[in-house]
Image (spheres, rainbow, N blue to C red):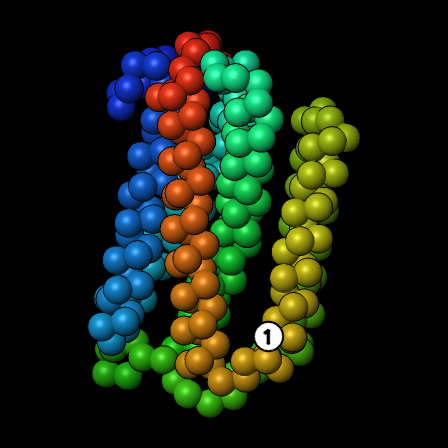
Amino acid sequence: MKETLAKPGFLIQTSTLGADLSYLLAVIFTGLFLFAWWQAKKGDGTRHHKLILVSMVSMVVYFIGYYYTRSLGVLSLEGKEGFGGPESIYNNVFIPVLTIHLVLVTLGLILTPYMIIEGFRAAQKIDGKWTLQSGILKANPARFKRIYLWLLAIWAGLQGVLMVAGKSIGSMIAYFLIFLTIALVIGIEKLVEKLLPDGDRRHRILGRGTMILFALILVTSTATYLMLYVFYPVRTALG
């Protein structure tokens, strides 16, 4: 699979198939998110609910499958070996943009499942149509405990699989940090409840922020793609 992804791209010959696929899907998913946001602003809650749910789940599945095959740090590796521009541009422009991009992607992957769950909690289905409901929205403390226990069980099982597969300690630490991040986000929900108690207002504000985040991800992704494969292209055989 890695060899296939390293083949010449279909958008531009100086790129790779993997990079083109990644960028094209970033454009498609961002377009779907923004269109779903537009549906929400029009008051079409049902179509918004269905489209955002399908597109967000698809994005997460794609991300996990794609980066498991290609490895998460591939952009950094391609940047180091494939960047053909001046050293000053690499250090002062490319690396900062790439770092911001990876941070935004990480935040996006954290917010995606959170917004899916929060969307179901903040909405209600009446006569087959989804609408946001006003009023104080609080999570059940017992449910929080169950979620943490499930996360702990999943993380423990994953660590066991990594040990059996002979993965490095670094990989195990990375997954542990991901677990801690998710646990922290769930814990922050209690703070969100205090700052934005109304379910309708909370979903609109967090949804707006999430859509802006994905738009910024596309901007940084485009900048990274252009610097690697258009402005300063160097053909590499990276997977």
- Looking at the rendered image, the quarter that the N terminus falls into is top left
For disc 1, the marked residue is 192
Q: How many marks?
A: 1
Residue 174, image x and y in percent? 69, 39
**Rendered view: 106 above or below 145:** above
Q: Is residue 225 found left or right of 74 in the rendered image? A: left
**Rendered view: 116 above or below 197:** above
Q: Nearer the viewer, residue 85 or 13?
A: 85
Residue 163, image x and y in percent? 74, 31
- Amino acid type of the residue that numbered disc 1 sits on in the rendered structure: Val
Q: Nearer the viewer, residue 29 or 228?
A: 228
Q: Residue at x 33, y 46 (%)?
A: 29
Can residue 5 be seen?
Answer: no
- Residue sticking out furthest to the bottom: 135
Q: Residue at x 77, y 30 (%)?
A: 169
Picture quadrant of residue 222: top left
Residue 74, image x and y in percent? 53, 25
Q: Is residue 231 found left or right of 145 in the rendered image? A: left
Query: Which element is circle 1 on?
Result: helix
Picture quadrant of residue 230: top left
Q: Residue at x 67, y 59 (%)?
A: 183
- Residue sticking out furthest to the right: 169
Dot 1 alpha-carbon crowd within 10 angstroms: few under 14, some 14 to 19, many 20 or more? some
Residue 145, image x and y in percent? 69, 70
Can residue 69 be seen?
Answer: yes
